Image: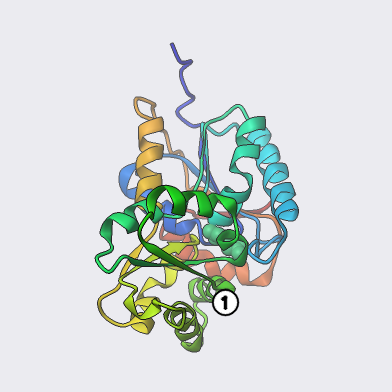
Amino acid sequence: MEPSVDPAAPILLFDSGVGGLSVLAELRTLLPDAPIIYTADNGGLPYGTKTEAQVAARVCGLLGRMSERFAPRLICIACNTASTIALGMVRDVLHVPVVGTVPAIKPAAALTKTRVIGLLGTDATIRQAYVDQLEAEFAQGKRLLRFGAPDLVAAAEAKLRGQKVDPEVFQRAAQGLRSQPGGEEIDTVVLACTHFPLVETELAEAFGPGVHFIDGATGIARRIAFLTQGQQFARREGDLALFTRDEESLAALRPALAALGLERIAVLD
Ligand code: DGL
């Protein structure tokens, strides 16, 4: 029999920045009473332009520290870049269930009618063997066009701070896929970075009608609900958003964080 879980033990969500909030939004609808610690490694943001070794070192090191300090019942790596690079390594060293974020190529392949799928991710994600494997397994007989769009990460960070974002950024991302051979036929776009659902409305405008966007958030939330089935939850106070670097603009994130029940902000010491 499984040992009983402390009802106050948090679910820990981890991302390089605010992207994981797109996963938290889905999780809140399924598990509204779950205590959450949201960790953003803003000191390492962006992950998408770093090497595999740099990302793996940060993710493994930080999640090791977090799990010792907060004894989470489950960790969710709410970041495609970190998951496609380091999920296996993290699972090897931590004695806690770890849920990763995998580009939603499987559901996209089931949905496309034109058989041409676009994938927007970070530069690091789109070059991972993990993505090649998903393509080989689930997108056979279909065309998967990939485009690295690091500007969208900065755009999502700015949007959640209430800052203005240049619409050119979204046009460039759409163009990056549309201009590839077959790109005009894309009817389904995988948002393979957790930041991107935060700017889905702007992307939809840039792509024009007839394009479906798919991300992994609902599937991840369901997986977490499944793995914590039967456990008790006790949320005692406003949940914590933890950052790895103090910066002035954190204050501007308060409304976006509070909307998801993250009422306390702290910086990792
Ligand atoms: N949110 C992250 C992802 O899902 C990465 C953003 C970044 O740090 O580049 O890939």
Residue lying farthest to the top in this orientation: 1
SS state under label 1? helix
Q: Amino acid at mark 1?
A: Asp
Along the viewing direction, whichever of 146 and 164 lies nearer the viewer: 146
Along the viewing direction, whichever of 130 and 192 lies nearer the viewer: 130
Displayed-image quarter of ligand 1:
bottom right
Question: Which residue is painted at 28% across and 63% down in the image?
Answer: 112
Residue 17 in sight from this viewpoint = no
Residue 47: % across, % down: 65, 61
Residue 240's place in the image compared with 204, above or below, is: above
Along the viewing direction, whichever of 227 and 176 lies nearer the viewer: 176
Residue 137's place in the image compared with 185, above or below, is: above
Residue lying farthest to the front in this orientation: 141
Crowdedness near tag 1: few (<14), some (14–19) or many (≥20) residues, C-alpha within 10 Å? few
Q: Is residue 36 toward the left or the right of residue 226 in the image?
A: right
Q: Quadrant of residue 142?
A: bottom left
Residue 64: % across, % down: 69, 37
Residue 23 in sight from this viewpoint = yes
Q: Quadrant of residue 246?
A: bottom right
- Mark 1 near ligand 1 (CB under 8 Å)? no
Along the viewing direction, whichever of 229 and 117 lies nearer the viewer: 117
Question: Which residue is painted at 67% across and 33% down in the image?
Answer: 68
Residue 28: % across, % down: 37, 48
Question: Which residue is painted at 65% across and 42% down in the image?
Answer: 63
List the residue tagged with mark 1.
151
Question: Which residue is painted at 41% across and 46% down in the image?
Answer: 220
Residue 231: % across, % down: 39, 26
